[in-house]
Amino acid sequence: MRLAQDFGYALRQLRRSPGFAITAILVLALGIGATATMFSVVDQVLLRPLPFQDPSRLVAISEASYDKDAANSDGGLPLPDVEDWQRRSHTMPAVSYWMFQVPLVGGIAHPQSVPQMLTSTNFFTMLSVGPAIGRGFLAGENVGAATHIVVLGDEAWSKLFQRDRGILGKSVRINGVSNTIVGVMPPRFRFQGGSELIFSPLDVTLKELQQRDSGALTLLARLRPGAT
Protein backbone atom coordinates (compact mmCIF):
# COMPACT_ATOMS: atom_id res chain seq x y z
CA MET A 1 0.00 0.00 0.00
CA ARG A 2 2.79 2.35 0.95
CA LEU A 3 4.59 1.62 -2.36
CA ALA A 4 1.45 2.45 -4.37
CA GLN A 5 1.09 5.77 -2.54
CA ASP A 6 4.74 6.66 -3.19
CA PHE A 7 4.37 5.75 -6.86
CA GLY A 8 1.24 7.89 -7.21
CA TYR A 9 2.94 10.82 -5.51
CA ALA A 10 5.95 10.51 -7.86
CA LEU A 11 3.66 10.54 -10.91
CA ARG A 12 1.88 13.67 -9.70
CA GLN A 13 5.21 15.43 -9.17
CA LEU A 14 6.38 14.51 -12.66
CA ARG A 15 3.16 15.87 -14.20
CA ARG A 16 3.71 19.19 -12.47
CA SER A 17 7.32 19.40 -13.78
CA PRO A 18 7.38 17.96 -17.33
CA GLY A 19 10.87 19.33 -18.00
CA PHE A 20 12.25 17.51 -14.98
CA ALA A 21 10.34 14.37 -16.00
CA ILE A 22 11.91 14.33 -19.47
CA THR A 23 15.39 14.90 -17.99
CA ALA A 24 14.89 12.08 -15.48
CA ILE A 25 13.71 9.67 -18.18
CA LEU A 26 16.69 10.54 -20.42
CA VAL A 27 19.14 10.04 -17.55
CA LEU A 28 17.58 6.66 -16.75
CA ALA A 29 17.69 5.62 -20.40
CA LEU A 30 21.35 6.61 -20.72
CA GLY A 31 22.23 4.80 -17.50
CA ILE A 32 20.46 1.61 -18.55
CA GLY A 33 22.03 1.77 -22.02
CA ALA A 34 25.54 2.28 -20.62
CA THR A 35 25.07 -0.56 -18.14
CA ALA A 36 23.87 -2.92 -20.89
CA THR A 37 26.83 -1.96 -23.10
CA MET A 38 29.37 -2.50 -20.31
CA PHE A 39 27.85 -5.87 -19.47
CA SER A 40 28.11 -6.92 -23.12
CA VAL A 41 31.81 -5.98 -23.15
CA VAL A 42 32.51 -7.76 -19.85
CA ASP A 43 30.54 -10.80 -21.02
CA GLN A 44 32.49 -11.05 -24.29
CA VAL A 45 35.94 -10.30 -22.83
CA LEU A 46 35.89 -11.70 -19.28
CA LEU A 47 32.99 -14.08 -18.72
CA ARG A 48 32.81 -16.16 -21.88
CA PRO A 49 35.66 -18.60 -22.43
CA LEU A 50 37.90 -18.03 -25.41
CA PRO A 51 36.77 -20.08 -28.45
CA PHE A 52 39.99 -22.12 -28.46
CA GLN A 53 41.00 -25.45 -26.97
CA ASP A 54 42.67 -25.08 -23.54
CA PRO A 55 42.94 -21.26 -23.73
CA SER A 56 44.75 -21.14 -20.38
CA ARG A 57 47.77 -22.75 -22.07
CA LEU A 58 48.02 -20.09 -24.78
CA VAL A 59 50.69 -17.41 -24.38
CA ALA A 60 51.61 -14.38 -26.48
CA ILE A 61 55.30 -13.46 -26.50
CA SER A 62 56.87 -10.15 -27.44
CA GLU A 63 60.19 -8.41 -26.96
CA ALA A 64 60.72 -5.03 -25.35
CA SER A 65 63.42 -2.56 -26.30
CA TYR A 66 64.59 0.41 -24.26
CA ASP A 67 65.61 2.09 -27.50
CA LYS A 68 62.52 3.99 -28.64
CA ASP A 69 64.00 4.29 -32.13
CA ALA A 70 64.48 0.54 -32.52
CA ALA A 71 62.30 -1.22 -35.09
CA ASN A 72 60.90 -3.59 -32.46
CA SER A 73 60.33 -0.99 -29.73
CA ASP A 74 56.61 -1.82 -29.87
CA GLY A 75 57.27 -5.43 -28.83
CA GLY A 76 57.28 -7.13 -32.24
CA LEU A 77 59.58 -10.07 -32.95
CA PRO A 78 61.76 -10.60 -36.04
CA LEU A 79 61.20 -13.83 -37.96
CA PRO A 80 64.70 -15.24 -37.19
CA ASP A 81 63.97 -14.91 -33.45
CA VAL A 82 60.60 -16.65 -33.88
CA GLU A 83 62.29 -19.50 -35.75
CA ASP A 84 64.76 -19.78 -32.85
CA TRP A 85 61.83 -20.12 -30.44
CA GLN A 86 60.30 -22.81 -32.64
CA ARG A 87 63.52 -24.84 -32.74
CA ARG A 88 64.74 -24.46 -29.17
CA SER A 89 61.71 -24.25 -26.89
CA HIS A 90 60.98 -27.34 -24.78
CA THR A 91 57.97 -25.94 -22.96
CA MET A 92 56.07 -24.80 -26.07
CA PRO A 93 55.50 -27.68 -28.51
CA ALA A 94 53.37 -25.48 -30.79
CA VAL A 95 54.58 -22.00 -31.79
CA SER A 96 52.92 -19.78 -34.37
CA TYR A 97 53.09 -16.12 -35.31
CA TRP A 98 51.12 -13.38 -37.01
CA MET A 99 51.12 -9.77 -38.08
CA PHE A 100 48.39 -7.30 -39.09
CA GLN A 101 47.86 -5.25 -42.19
CA VAL A 102 44.83 -3.47 -43.66
CA PRO A 103 44.89 -4.02 -47.43
CA LEU A 104 42.44 -2.93 -50.09
CA VAL A 105 40.21 -5.84 -51.07
CA GLY A 106 38.92 -5.72 -54.64
CA GLY A 107 37.14 -8.07 -56.99
CA ILE A 108 33.94 -7.51 -55.00
CA ALA A 109 30.94 -5.24 -55.49
CA HIS A 110 32.40 -2.45 -53.35
CA PRO A 111 36.22 -2.56 -52.87
CA GLN A 112 37.18 -1.66 -49.33
CA SER A 113 39.93 -1.84 -46.73
CA VAL A 114 39.68 -4.98 -44.59
CA PRO A 115 41.86 -6.01 -41.62
CA GLN A 116 44.02 -8.99 -42.51
CA MET A 117 46.15 -11.31 -40.43
CA LEU A 118 49.24 -12.80 -42.06
CA THR A 119 50.07 -15.93 -40.10
CA SER A 120 52.22 -19.01 -39.90
CA THR A 121 50.71 -22.01 -41.66
CA ASN A 122 50.10 -23.78 -38.32
CA PHE A 123 48.09 -20.89 -36.88
CA PHE A 124 44.65 -22.55 -36.94
CA THR A 125 45.90 -26.01 -36.01
CA MET A 126 47.81 -24.56 -33.05
CA LEU A 127 44.55 -23.01 -31.83
CA SER A 128 42.74 -26.31 -32.56
CA VAL A 129 40.09 -24.47 -34.58
CA GLY A 130 39.27 -25.38 -38.16
CA PRO A 131 37.22 -23.64 -40.85
CA ALA A 132 33.47 -24.22 -41.03
CA ILE A 133 33.79 -24.39 -44.82
CA GLY A 134 36.85 -25.46 -46.78
CA ARG A 135 40.30 -25.75 -45.24
CA GLY A 136 43.02 -23.86 -43.45
CA PHE A 137 46.66 -23.52 -44.47
CA LEU A 138 48.94 -26.36 -45.47
CA ALA A 139 52.64 -26.80 -44.78
CA GLY A 140 54.59 -25.20 -47.59
CA GLU A 141 52.02 -22.49 -48.29
CA ASN A 142 54.31 -19.87 -46.77
CA VAL A 143 56.53 -19.24 -49.79
CA GLY A 144 55.95 -16.93 -52.76
CA ALA A 145 52.78 -17.42 -54.80
CA ALA A 146 51.65 -20.29 -52.54
CA THR A 147 50.69 -17.62 -49.98
CA HIS A 148 48.08 -16.11 -52.31
CA ILE A 149 45.17 -17.83 -50.56
CA VAL A 150 42.59 -16.48 -48.13
CA VAL A 151 40.50 -17.80 -45.25
CA LEU A 152 37.58 -15.52 -44.41
CA GLY A 153 36.30 -14.71 -40.95
CA ASP A 154 32.55 -15.31 -40.62
CA GLU A 155 31.63 -11.60 -40.60
CA ALA A 156 33.95 -10.90 -43.52
CA TRP A 157 32.22 -13.71 -45.44
CA SER A 158 28.84 -12.14 -44.66
CA LYS A 159 29.85 -8.53 -45.29
CA LEU A 160 31.90 -9.02 -48.44
CA PHE A 161 30.22 -12.04 -50.05
CA GLN A 162 26.71 -12.17 -48.54
CA ARG A 163 27.41 -15.68 -47.14
CA ASP A 164 27.82 -17.17 -50.60
CA ARG A 165 27.96 -20.96 -50.06
CA GLY A 166 29.84 -21.37 -53.31
CA ILE A 167 32.65 -19.05 -52.24
CA LEU A 168 35.44 -21.67 -52.22
CA GLY A 169 37.78 -21.39 -55.18
CA LYS A 170 36.70 -17.88 -56.09
CA SER A 171 39.27 -15.12 -56.44
CA VAL A 172 39.58 -11.84 -54.58
CA ARG A 173 42.20 -9.15 -55.15
CA ILE A 174 44.23 -8.04 -52.15
CA ASN A 175 46.26 -4.91 -52.84
CA GLY A 176 45.92 -5.76 -56.52
CA VAL A 177 47.11 -9.38 -56.22
CA SER A 178 44.71 -12.23 -57.00
CA ASN A 179 44.10 -14.59 -54.05
CA THR A 180 42.02 -17.77 -53.96
CA ILE A 181 39.49 -18.24 -51.15
CA VAL A 182 40.03 -21.65 -49.54
CA GLY A 183 38.02 -21.48 -46.31
CA VAL A 184 35.57 -19.69 -44.02
CA MET A 185 35.94 -19.70 -40.22
CA PRO A 186 32.99 -20.55 -37.93
CA PRO A 187 31.03 -17.72 -36.27
CA ARG A 188 32.43 -18.59 -32.84
CA PHE A 189 36.00 -17.96 -34.00
CA ARG A 190 36.94 -14.47 -32.89
CA PHE A 191 40.58 -13.48 -32.75
CA GLN A 192 41.53 -10.14 -31.24
CA GLY A 193 37.82 -9.61 -30.52
CA GLY A 194 36.40 -9.79 -34.05
CA SER A 195 35.45 -12.05 -36.93
CA GLU A 196 35.62 -9.44 -39.72
CA LEU A 197 39.21 -10.47 -40.38
CA ILE A 198 40.61 -12.24 -43.39
CA PHE A 199 43.62 -14.55 -43.04
CA SER A 200 46.52 -15.45 -45.34
CA PRO A 201 49.86 -17.22 -44.84
CA LEU A 202 52.84 -14.96 -44.32
CA ASP A 203 55.51 -15.23 -47.03
CA VAL A 204 58.62 -16.12 -45.02
CA THR A 205 60.92 -15.39 -47.97
CA LEU A 206 60.27 -11.65 -47.84
CA LYS A 207 63.62 -9.94 -47.47
CA GLU A 208 62.39 -7.46 -44.87
CA LEU A 209 61.42 -10.31 -42.54
CA GLN A 210 64.94 -11.76 -42.49
CA GLN A 211 66.43 -8.83 -40.56
CA ARG A 212 67.05 -9.38 -36.86
CA ASP A 213 65.85 -5.84 -36.18
CA SER A 214 62.62 -6.08 -38.21
CA GLY A 215 60.35 -6.63 -35.19
CA ALA A 216 57.18 -7.28 -37.18
CA LEU A 217 55.65 -10.39 -35.62
CA THR A 218 53.65 -11.41 -32.57
CA LEU A 219 54.45 -14.90 -31.33
CA LEU A 220 51.58 -17.10 -30.11
CA ALA A 221 52.37 -20.42 -28.48
CA ARG A 222 50.76 -23.29 -26.61
CA LEU A 223 52.45 -24.43 -23.42
CA ARG A 224 53.14 -28.08 -22.77
CA PRO A 225 50.80 -29.53 -20.08
CA GLY A 226 52.26 -28.75 -16.67
CA ALA A 227 54.49 -25.95 -17.94
CA THR A 228 54.10 -22.44 -16.52
Image (cartoon, helix red, strand yellow):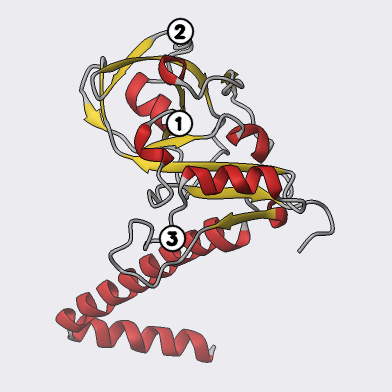
Q: Earlier in the sequence, mark 3 or mark 2?
A: 3
Local packing at callout 3 (Cα closer than 10 Å; few below 14, some 14-19, many 20+) is some
Q: Is residue 104 left or right of residue 191?
A: left
Give the residue displayed 45% in from the left and 44% down from the top: 194
Q: Amino acid at mark 3?
A: Gly
Residue 136: x and y in percent read 58, 23
Q: Earlier in the sequence, mark 2 or mark 1?
A: 2
Residue 46 seen from this side: yes
**Quadrant (top left, top right, bottom left, bottom right) of the N terminus:** bottom right
Give the residue displayed 57% in from the left and 23% down from the top: 137
Q: Which mark is residue 169?
A: 2
Q: Is residue 113 left or right of residue 143?
A: left
Q: Amino acid at mark 1?
A: Leu
Q: Between 70 and 15, which is closer to the camera in this rendering?
A: 70
Q: Which mark is residue 202?
A: 1
Q: Is residue 26 positioned above or below 100 on the image?
A: below
Residue 202 quadrant: top left
Give the residue displayed 33% in from the left and 56% down from the top: 71
**Quadrant (top left, top right, bottom left, bottom right) of the C terminus:** bottom right
Tag 1–tag 3 contact (CB < 8 Å): no
